[in-house]
Each structure stands twice: as structure tokens, then as C-alpha cells.
Amino acid sequence: MDTSTLVLFAATVLPLICTPGPDMLFVSSQALGGGASAGLRATLGVCLGYAVHSVLVAAGVAALLAAFPLVFAALRWIGVLYLIRLAVGMIRSALRREDGGAAAPLVAAPLRKGLLTALLNPKGMMIYFALLPQFLRAGDDLAGTAAALSGIFIALCALVYSILSLALSLVGRRGGPARGGARDRRRRIVEGVSGGLLIAAAGRLAAAG
């Protein structure tokens, strides 16, 4: 394994990571709704999901999905329905006025939800299945090279989504502290936008087939 292979792989996957997709839209919704902490926990969850994907690929599950398209499609639609369920919860909360302006939690369990979002996005597994083999060469330590490439992909995801979380958290806080009705209006706007981002993520995942 040489450095040029690692650099070429990083240059190949970075544009894919930066292209808005279900993972990026989910992290964005969490950062807008719950601030940098929620966005970073969602990012960690997504990265853990991709780590699981790498183990599944090594175990041959990706080949199984490729051989049975109906299983692949079923997994994708489960992911779509999961994102829609999260979006409906946020939008319903956005439509509900809180008495006394008390703000309800904007997001909950972002790490777990990020993990499930990545796991239920079969395109992530297919990135490993379709891209990684292109960078493996006969004579290399295949297991070591695959692990290094997977580590690069996960590290780049962590970097891009962490920067995104920090940037969007500033948008969510812009305008300074608010009280009473103003705070409740801000909460409802943020949750509505976050729910819309999750709907968009579900749409991207549905269209990916």
C-alpha cells in the first residue's frame, strides 16, 4: 500500500461526502435543532454506522445485498420510512405551541439516530463494495489496505460533518437569547426547518434506487 493510493482514494470520496445526501441532511437537522453538541453526536453516530458497514462488507453482506436486489430495496425503504418518522415528529412539534414559551427538547438521542440513519442507508455499504475494490492491488495486504481506506472515509466523514455541525449551530443560535413567545417561535421555526431537512433526506434516499 502506497501513499498515492490513499491520497487518490481520499480525493475520490471527498466530493461524494460533500454532496448533500441522507447523512448530511440528517446531521444538518440535528445541528440546527439541538446545536453543535447534537450535530457532533449525530456525526459520531453516522461514523459508527459506517464502521459497522465496513465490518459487514468484510463479512460479505454487501455481496449478499448485491445478489438480492429486493433485500437491498427493502433496506432502503426502511431507511426512508425511518427518516420520514423522525421528520413527522419534528414537524408536529413545530406546529404545537408551548404554553408559557417553554421550549421542548429539539432533538433526542442524535447518536443513536445517526447510527440507524447510516445503517439503513445501503448506499453507504455499496460505497465500500463498489469503490474499495478499485483501490486494492494484487500483492498488497488486502485486509490492511481495506482497513486504511475505510478509516480515511470515516475520518473524512467525521471532519466534514463536524465542520457542518459547528457552522449550522451558529445559524441556530443567531439572534441571541429569546424569551417567552419569541423563544417559542424560534423553536418552531428551527424544528420546522429540521423536519424539512429530514424529508429531503428521505427523498434523496428514495430517489437513490
Image: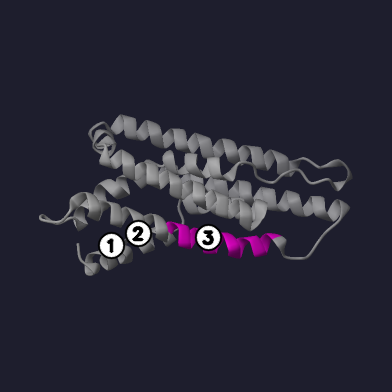
Where is the C terminus found, in terms of image quarters? top left
Q: Which residue is mark 3?
A: 162
Residue type at the position of mark 1: Phe
Residue 203 shown in magenta = no
Query: What crowding class fits label 1: few (fewer than 14 Cα within 10 Å), some (14-19), or many (20 or more)?
Result: some
- Secondary element under disc 3, as helix, strand or loop, is helix
Task: Tell me which secondary structure the magenta stretch mostly adopts.
Answer: helix
Residue type at the position of mark 3: Ser
Q: Quadrant of residue 120?
A: top left
From the viewer's perspective, is residue 73 above or below residue 198? above
Label 1 and label 2: CA atoms lie apart by 8 Å
Q: Quadrant of residue 170?
A: bottom right
Residue 132: mark in rendering? none
* Residue 189 in view (yes/no): yes
Q: Which segment is the magenta one?
A: 157-172
**Nearer the observer, 31 or 66:** 31
Q: Which residue is mark 2?
A: 152
